[in-house]
Amino acid sequence: MSSLIPKGVFSCPEDNQRIKAAWQHFLQSAELPGDVAVRPPVDQSWRRCLDSRVDPGLRQAPEPLTEVQLQAIRERHRRLLDASMPVMAMARELMAQSGNIMLLADRNGMVIEAGGDYATLSQAERIHLMPGSPWNEQFCGTNAIGTALLLGQPVQIHAAEHFCEGIKRWTCSASVIRDPRDGHILGALDVSGESQSFSRHSLALAVTTAHRIESALARHEMASRYRLLELSIEQLAAHHDEGLLLFDPHGFLVRSNLHGPAALAARGIDLDIRGACRLPALALGPEGSPAGPLPDWLPGDWLRPVQARGEVLGMLVRIPWPARAAGTLVAPKADQRAPAERAPGFARLVGNSAAMVAALHKAQQLAGCNVPVLLQGETGAGKEAFAQGIHYSGIGREGPFVAINCGSLSRELLASELFGYAEGAFTGARRGGMKGKIEAAHGGTLFLDEIGEMPLDLQSHLLRALEEGEIYRLGECEPRRVDFRLVTATHRDLREEVAQRRFRQDLFYRVAVTSIRIPPLRERRDDIPLLAGHILKREAERHGRPLPELDPEALQALMAHDWPGNVRELRNVLEGMLLLGGRRLTRDDLPDELRQSARLAAGAVEGQLEEAEREVIRQAIERSRGNLTQAAKALGIAKSTLYLRLRKYGMSRVPEAGERLRLE
């Protein structure tokens, strides 16, 4: 934790008397005595307070706001309050009788929430250290909340280090809370108590808690963006005659379609959408409409609100191509393929079941959008085939498709495979070095299979490559720029992996912008006949064999199997049957384990049929009051056949009239 806190921010309580004497000297001469060392953050803050004419005799902060005024401010900071709610609830429980309180302030130093030790909260109210009071340096002089906000870093202010006389009985530690979207300061988290409760650990607690709030904000932000993107993905993928830009409710750019940059350039609009881009005018007001005046280049009829259940979640901006003299639009040629037709990159994916069609439809939509895609599915379900489909039907189809399985390599080998290495980076390094998979995917698609198996320390390096767009080869100091589309896959539940701290939360939200669940084969059994025919045809051509006929009983056995290895297992089974069988593949050509399961399944069905027949006979005899002639007639069988069935099912004697049939 100490690495997160800059040097010079910790107080030294043993110097309290000397610092108090230095403060008195400073007030008289505007200079510090040469024999007393005051920490730089405190020294600089005292000088700012003197220049701003802050009253050093101040006993308390300004009077708190009214409840109505405070509530209005709290509503403006609802996002920050919601993210900090679990933390503040914890403070109320864990800080009871600890002598400390926890305070949340907005970016102006206004305290908007407080919790902790009840007695200390009461003492804090005497100096107005409470919700509704401002604690910036301009009003209260040197203090942890105001000084941390001004410096933008963690600060601990103890006792005599405060500039104002009435606050010198207190010790406080604060850390700023930054917006995960662009890093601007949202507020501060402070841990305070009377001076005798001083602890260096208070600052570490403030920093850790602030980071937890930032993580909660990031989770909420990514969930909101995911929902917004899900609602807009069809429009982003479908429009080929105009540029489309998707903005979140705060005016931040979420995504552009393929033609966004070109459409902006064609109209001479100077808007850089390659990095972090924000249009403050598109931040939504309480009514769900842009809060500020729109830029001159943005007509109101270009805006399309994205809504769900009446709530506006963001704004889609359409950028029409400029008209030619004849009034036609200048736009790239649109792909006129019918929506139901499968894109070329997905042609190798076979299946018409509802689950498969839904997954394919979503994949085809996402192929045209430059967003990371997470493929979730069991081993052998076809994740790499989906990844290739997205690549060869998508925006980077002309670039390379580079795949690597993160679970099949050791940590050291995976690091060199991903990032490459310089010549001489380690013993046995190739002369001239080696380009890594990330670098090799430049201009195309990087497919990271089984990303859930990636070691934690490598996850941080991957995250940096994704966020900064650059990588360092092992043994090199100069970064290399990379630009690629990311598709990842896993059979694990990454949310559970994050909860168990086996997968980085920030990386999860970076790679799982959109996700596709690939159904296992047992959930799409209706596709097995089509898949079997496709696989047999391909394998027969590959091995130079005539295409065999698949016996209906063998096909029934294939459809009854659960296929834990999914399509990969089905392919292996059919290839083995092709190589070892004849022109007609029967149940006898099945592998032993499938033959056994087929027999068990057939036996189970046969047993169910016999039990059903036994019950029908019993009911027929009961309805005929034991008259076997009438019972046989009702059953549509000969009386002799009925006697055979009675012996088969252990119905040892014919019941008398009115007597129930006894089964042995």
Image (spheres, rainbow, N blue to C red):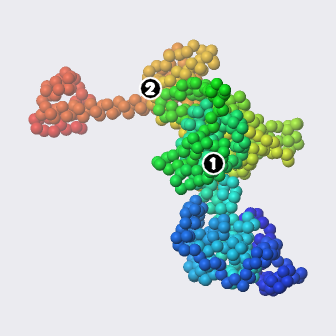
Picture coordinates of residue 117 (x, y %)?
58, 77
- Count the marks: 2
Residue carrying label 2: 556
Q: Position of residue 222 (x, y in %)?
A: 60, 50
Q: Where's residue 253, x and y in %? A: 65, 46
Above or below residue 357? Residue 502 is: below
Vertical side of 500 occupied by 407: above or below: above
Question: According to the image, label 1 marks what residue?
Answer: 294
Q: Nearer the viewer, mark 1 or mark 2?
A: 1
> Which residue does the image show at 71% across and 28% down from the upper left?
398
- Closer to the N terminus: mark 1 or mark 2? 1
233 or 587, nearer to the observer? 233
Packing grade of label 1 (10 A; few <14, some 14-19, many >=20) is: some
The image quadrant of residue 255 is top right
Whether residue 38 is visible here, answered yes or no, is yes
Residue drawn 53% across and 51% down?
288
Give the residue at the far front of this rendering. Answer: 325
Disc 2 crowd, CA 10 A, few/some/many (<14, 14-19, 20+): some
Camera sees residue 445: no
The secondary element bearing badge 1 is classed as: loop
Identify the amino acid type marked 2.
Gln
> In terms of secondary structure, where does tag 2 sit?
helix
- Name the one closer to the observer, 372 or 112: 112
User: Which quadrant of the figure has residue 170?
Assistant: bottom right
Q: Amino acid at mark 1?
A: Leu
- CA gap, disc 1 to disc 2? 64 Å
**Which residue appears at 55% of the width and 42% of the height?**
304
